[in-house]
Image (spheres, rainbow, N blue to C red):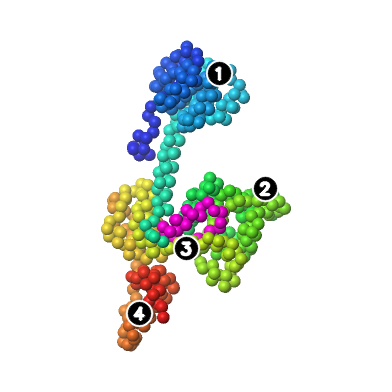
Amino acid sequence: MTEATDLMLPIASKILLVDDDPTPTQYLKQLLAGEGYQVDTAHSGETAIEQLKQFSYKVLISDLNMPGISGMGLLDYCKENFPEMQVIILTAYGTIQSAVQALKTGAFDYLTKPVQLEELNIVLKKALAFERLKIRHDFLSQEFEKKEKFLYQSNNPAFQKILEIVDEIKDVGTTVLLQGESGTGKEVIARLIHKSSLRASSNFVSINCGAIPESLIESELFGYDKGAFTDAKSNSKGKLEFADGGTVFLDEINELSPKGQVALLRFLQEKEIVPLGSYRKITVNVRIIVATNKNLRALIQDGNFREDLYYRISVFPINLPPLNERREDIVPLAHWFIDKFKREYSKPADSLSEDARKVLLNYSWPGNIRELQNCIERATILSKGKVIEDDVFLMPIPEQSAPLNFENIGLLPLKDLETAYILWALEKMDGNKNQTANQLGISPRGLRYKLKP
């Protein structure tokens, strides 16, 4: 917690003491003032409400039984109008029922009169500590959300369009297929869809399909009942039931086994699950988002992915561009990661030198955003000062190809020579047109144009 943040926390412990009997009220006020509290008093619920409208209090201590607006009436008013303020109820007629009712309504604590100063002081300190903790939590949550939102921003027109699409579909229950190279942020987009939707208050469950053995896929997804197999000692919820009302993200859907594909298809068709070892059907309301870094149509052609499942999961396909097509975002993302890791590792780094920027912008990023994150994490740790220099980057050195021997090539039309060179470069890049275009210093569209017959 920084000094600036601490200034945002309450420094004055101002208390409003409410009781229709002035004598014990004045006595308790003097005792609390001696403990360092600032105490105002009110002798009715109506007067207390007027004071609450005019002044700011951290804690309200109220007698339960008063003419007119009672302590419970004040508690209801405070919970509705001042939900951050803690309320302590005092009464000489304590019963279990009234204590339970007060605590259920939102009272911080409930004490019987005559209250002991030591006991009240302990409760007050806890109430004020709780209030400070909540303010700190809310502040940090807002800061985290503000920083996290940066991941969902972009200067790239293609990615901005994706964010617009996400906003349009966030509250529609349709299945979404996220496609893109490894490290392009598919899970980040899946979480964005969930967090910005009406399902945000329910669970987001991420499942790596490649990490689940075929023999366990049904128990993982659907759960099991006691006795379903040797080690099933009790009932267990599956991931789909656990996410009821929320979102299930199936990463690497291309790695799902044939048995898993059948199980998922059945669920998508029926919206019901049957735990292993059970005959009971459970209706589950979840949104399914799947992701892949493979060409599912090619897998279908090879017989490695079910065509009927493909059409079920690709109701709304979204293609995420690789990082080398989002060059406008490289430096802003790098700064986001610097801020993240300097806090995590208590390092001084907070910016990039001009040479460091050039290195980042000129690199091809085959590992996409994940590789950029790893790169900045290392650089932040290795950097000695506030500015990260290019010499702390551990970039792989590109292979040096042998110079072309034009004598062996012979005389060719310039267009044919250019085409042959592009095809050679494509082979070196394993057929990746985006990376090839980046290495050749042209746009992917320009590459496609040059390869046209």
Q: Amino acid at mark 2?
A: Ser
The residue depicted at 31 percent of the width and 79 percent of the height is: 403
Q: Amino acid at mark 4?
A: Glu
Q: Which mark is residue 319?
A: 3
Is residue 120 visible in the rendered image? The answer is no
Single out the mark in the foreground, 4 or 2.
4
Q: Residue furthest right?
A: 279
Q: Which mark is residue 418?
A: 4
Residue 264 appears in which quarter of the rendering? bottom right
Q: Residue furthest front?
A: 168
Q: Earlier in the sequence, mark 4 or mark 2?
A: 2
Residue neighbourhood size for the residue with mark 3, other residues' Cα within 10 Å, grouped as few (<14), some (14–19), many (≥20)? some
Residue 255, magenta (yes or no): no
Q: Which residue is mark 2?
A: 234
> Relative to 450, does residue 378 appear above or below in the rendering?
above
Residue 307 appears in which quarter of the rendering? bottom right
Q: Which residues are magenta?
A: 159-185
SS class of the residue under badge 3? strand
> Relative to 89, does residue 176 appear above or below in the rendering?
below
The residue depicted at 64 percent of the width and 49 percent of the height is: 236
Q: Earlier in the sequence, mark 2 or mark 3?
A: 2
Residue 389 appears in which quarter of the rendering? bottom left
Between the residue at mark 4 and the residue at mark 1, the CA separation in whole angstroms equals 92 Å
Q: Earlier in the sequence, mark 1 or mark 2?
A: 1
Between 141 and 198, the residue placed more toward the observer is: 198
Residue 165, magenta (yes or no): yes
SS class of the residue under badge 1? loop
Q: Which mark is residue 283?
A: none
Between the residue at mark 1 and the residue at mark 2, the CA separation in whole angstroms equals 50 Å
Q: Earlier in the sequence, mark 1 or mark 3?
A: 1
Q: Which residue is mark 1?
A: 65
Q: Amino acid at mark 1?
A: Asn
